[in-house]
Image (cartoon, rainbow, N blue to C red):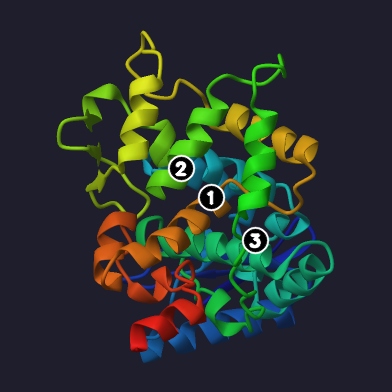
Amino acid sequence: MAGFRLRNNKWQARIQRDGYPNLAKSFDNKSDAIKWATKIEAEMDRGSYINTSLAERTTFSELILRYLQEVTPKTKSAKEDGFRLRALARKPIAKYSMIALTPSRIAEYRDIRLREVTAGTVIRELAYFSCVINHARREWGINIDNPIPLIRKPETPPSRTRVLSEVEKDKLFDIFKPRFKNSNPWILFIVQFALETAMRQGEILGLSWADIDLNKRTAHLETTKNGDRRTVPLSTRAVQILKELPRSIDGRVFPMNRPALCANFESACKRAGIEDLHFHDLRHTAITNMAGKFSNILELSAVTGHRQLSMLKKYYHPKAENLALKLG
């Protein structure tokens, strides 16, 4: 049986039962205390009781910060994930306890964010929410259902189909000429190499000379976005670019960090008058250009590293008139 006592002008209900942890909760009036105790004891009788006391006293922000300390450093995208998770931990919704993080509150957050950012950003944030909550349920004893699957997700925005045209490429390369003294000398090589190999930004910046075999015309990628090792075949032009590079003392092929590359690329596009071009669009451009050089999409996927052909289709845009010529 539950016990009740008046303590500091609050009615405290206490439940002690073999096989369960001792429970106590305070209420403004005795009737609420009795209702709570009756409900908990009924659940214990049915064997359906789940202890949510830890979830009640833990805020979502606390979970995110713990996730940042214990889980995020072990991920490949630790820096990017850390930046986004810290931003989420400052949101008003993160102040709620986990027991109060209901589907309706998540849905309200979704609707507010959709007025501020794109649907893609909201989908990514909800994915972060779900990862943190699922980890807390599995590893940290937070006994709540994950509310994220219970709400409607925003419609996935259409994939980008932006490619760099030949005219834009000429304009961009012209910006990198030596007369622009404030231009980073590595940026032209990186852009040219990206267009020749279809490698991702992180893969290019992570290359060391130990990964390059100029005789076999290959670049070995020990770590990639999907976790698989990959050896990228190099075109004649890609090999020529590598041979023209000065050697960095730290062994990296392209001694440049991601923020500097992004800043330089954005600045170059602006000066060249090129709008809405992201560095990742160079990968899209390269894959589109490669599509006509391989006999089937499986060969193309071996170069690009896509596990699923459905993902590769986002980049694979052969021209209809070229396909018509193959039909005969």
**Callout 2–callout 1 Cβ contact below 8 Å:** yes
How far apart in space, not on screen, are marks 2 and 1 (Cα)?
Answer: 6 Å
Which label sits on residue 282?
1
Residue 102 locus on image (x, y percent)? 65, 75
Q: Is residue 78 visible?
A: yes
Would you name the residue on which mark 2 appears? 194
Viewed as shown, does residue 17 lie left or right of 217? right
Query: Earlier along the polypeptide chain: callout 1 or callout 3?
Result: 3
Mark 3 against mark 2, which lies toward the viewer? 2
Would you name the residue on which mark 3 appears? 97
How far apart in space, not on screen, are marks 1 and 3 (Cα)?
Answer: 44 Å
Residue projecting furthest to the left: 216
Residue beneath the point at 38% across and 46% down: 197
In the displayed structure, 152 sits above or below 239; it is: below
Number of disc labels: 3
Viewed as shown, does residue 230 lie left or right of 327? left
Query: Earlier along the polypeptide chain: callout 3 or callout 2?
Result: 3
Depth check: give the residue in front, 29 or 79: 79
